[in-house]
Amino acid sequence: MWQTVKEYIQKKYRIEPDFPFREDMDTAVFRHQDNRRWFALVMDVTASKLGLSKEARLPVINLKIDDPLLRDILLRQDGIFPAYHMNKMHWITVLLDGSVEKERVLDLIDASFLASASPKKKGKLRPAKEWIVPANPKYYDILHAFDEREEIDWKQGAGIRTGDTVFLYVAAPVSAVLYQCKVTRTGIPYHFESEHLTITALMKLRLQKRFAADAFPFERLRKEFGITAVRGPRTVPHSLSSALAKAKPAEPVRQKA
């Protein structure tokens, strides 16, 4: 994975690693060219230092994640830990041993590059993204949400911005991607708390396209696109993005009078 990370950063950002510790040529740092800030630190650490019950040396990458909500979500996922030897309020440690899928690691490198960029560069860097966002029909009637309107309020997803695209994955018993929406507004103040859900902000989603329930079911997401779970907002793999773009829209189901 180290070679994959190196080649990705070299190709996308034209940045070479440097080795600041003369006595440790296995530890590599990637820096912004303008402000010289680190955005990635690749090294080996003892597993026990990450709270794992073994002594093996593991390859890891430290990445900056400023969004506290996103960082909290990430730290609940396998292979991602509070940063080793860095500020745990702003950095995470990600295993490079295959525990975290390659595309997820590369997405987090992009997030770290943006988080550590200069203010001027940040304004130019962030292109629109595509996300898969779960929707649970047990708590919200998502199946009929767009019957009478094309725009709805939704829980603000960590990292999601105005202009991004959200694909709503409807959980069991549907278990499929049903809607493509454009994010038209984010950061709307709101407070709601229940046994199952806490909301501190909303975003607005405008319907762009519907999908048939058998077009992108969970089994297809898993087998063809490597998506093993949709527990929170996650970026869309390139292969799935292409398939979603090519899919024919489904006709809305009209309710009988």
Image (cartoon, rainbow, N blue to C red):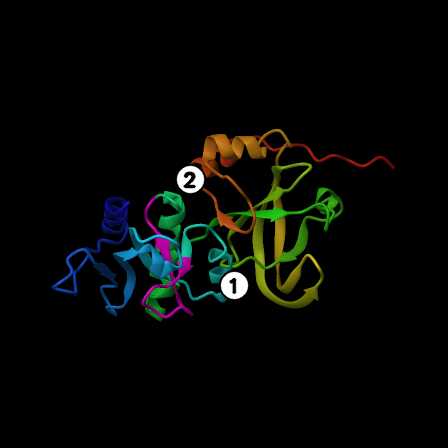
Magenta run includes residue 88: yes
Q: Which mark is residue 69?
A: 1
Q: Residues within 10 Å of mark 2 (few under 14, many from 20)?
A: few
Please provide percent x and percent y for residue 21: 16, 65
- Counting from the top left corner in percent of width and height, residue 66 is at 43, 66
Residue 82, picture quadrant: bottom left
Point out which mark residue 237 bears.
Answer: none
- Between residues 154 and 140, which one lies in front from this camera angle? 140
Residue 115, quarter of picture? bottom left
* Sequence order check, earlier mark of 1 and 2: 1
Give the x, y percent position of residue 157: 56, 57
Position of the N terminus, as image quadrant, is: top left
**Three-letter amino acid code at the position of disc 1:** Leu
- Residue at image point 39% right, 57% down: 111
Q: Residue at x 68, y 32 (%)?
A: 251
Which numbered dot is residue 238?
2
- Stretch in magenta: 81-97
Q: Is residue 160 magenta?
A: no
Judging depth in this view, the residue of 23 and 178 nearest the camera is 23
Residue farthest left in this picture: 22
In the image: residue 212, left or right of residue 116: right
Cα distance in 3D space between marks 1 and 2 = 25 Å
Q: Secondary structure at mark 1?
A: helix
Residue 214 shown left or right of residue 229 in the figure: right
Q: Is residue 92 above or below residue 169?
A: below
Whether 195 is drawn above or below 12: the answer is below
243 to the left or right of 144: left
Which circle, 1 or 2, is nearer the viewer? 1
